[in-house]
């Protein structure tokens, strides 16, 4: 089992105390990760929860779940999340958004083949062979720190190109990446 690094009181995120709703949200995410692992569905937790997993605990409230899914498991993943009560909100054929019918949770995912569109062929940077992160002692797969840094940079470039403005959590991500690099 992967354990988070102890950062002591010098961390900009300690002590972060999640709300009860946030605990339910993160437990739901971890249940999805556990079940996918048991079923042989290869997923990787992208975004804020993924960085939190590298850090070893949740550092802020999150509003959604971001996943990468290996292409060969995409259909199986869709069936699984739809069985959990998620309904498709939108898709552009590459990025898919779902909302949970009862809880309102948002879930976004893209298949691994999308990385090739950006010239990335180092699949293990985004889908490590082993579980490499944890929250509350529960292990899951997330991109390496290098993979997360590339995704943050790419996300910011796309936001600039499309005139979306600053990504709402970019300052937090920068602080978290800096803490992880130390």
Image (spheres, rainbow, N blue to C red):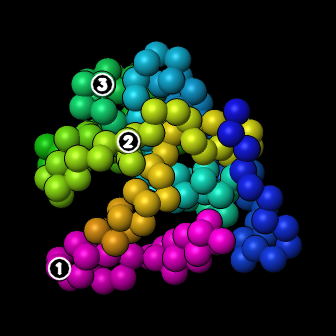
Give the CA separation, mark 3 to mark 1.
31 Å
Depth order, front residue of 166/151: 151
Q: Quadrant of residue 168?
A: bottom left
Q: Is residue 54 left or right of residue 146?
A: right
Q: Which residue is mark 1?
A: 161
Q: Nearer the viewer, mark 1 or mark 2?
A: 2
Residue 33 - label: none
Residue 124 location, x and y as percent?
38, 42
User: Is disc 3 surrounded by few (<14), some (14 to 19) or many (20+) residues within 10 Å?
Assistant: some
Which label's residue is closer to the chain start, 3 or 1?
3
Mark 3 lies on a secondary structure that is helix
**Category of crowding for the residue at label 1, using alpha-carbon neighbours closer than 10 angstroms: few (below 14), some (14–19), many (at least 20):** few
As drawn, the label of residue 124 is: 2
Marks 3 and 2: CB-CB under 8 Å? no
Q: CA distance from mark 3 to mark 2?
A: 16 Å
Going from N to C along the chain, the mark reached first, 1 or 2, is: 2
Q: Residue, x 17% and y 79% (percent of image)? A: 161
Residue 142 is inside the magenta segment: no
- Residue 12 coordinates in the image, percent (x, y): 72, 77
35 lies above or below 138? above
Tell me which label, 3 or 2, sits earlier in the chain. 3
Residue 177 is inside the magenta segment: yes
**Tag 3 near tag 1, CB within 8 Å:** no
* Magenta span main SS: helix
Q: Which residues are magenta?
A: 156-182
């Amino acid at each position: 089992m992967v354990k988070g690094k102890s950062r002591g009181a010098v961390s900009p995120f300690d002590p972060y105390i999640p709300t009860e709703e946030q605990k339910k949200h993160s437990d739901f995410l971890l249940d999805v990760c556990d079940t996918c692992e048991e079923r042989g569905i290869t997923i990787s937790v992208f975004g804020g929860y993924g960085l939190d997993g590298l850090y070893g605990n949740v550092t802020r409230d999150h509003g959604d779940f971001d996943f990468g899914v290996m292409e060969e498991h995409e259909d199986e993943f869709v069936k699984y999340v739809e069985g959990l009560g998620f309904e498709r909100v939108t898709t552009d054929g590459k990025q898919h958004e779902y909302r949970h019918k009862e809880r309102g949770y948002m879930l976004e995912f893209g298949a691994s083949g999308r990385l090739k569109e950006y010239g990335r062929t180092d699949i293990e940077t985004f889908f490590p062979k082993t579980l490499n992160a944890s929250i509350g002692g529960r292990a899951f797969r997330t991109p390496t720190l290098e993979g997360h840094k590339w995704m943050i940079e790419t996300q910011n470039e796309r936001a600039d190109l499309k005139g979306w403005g600053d990504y709402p959590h970019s300052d937090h991500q920068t602080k978290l990446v800096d803490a992880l690099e130390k």
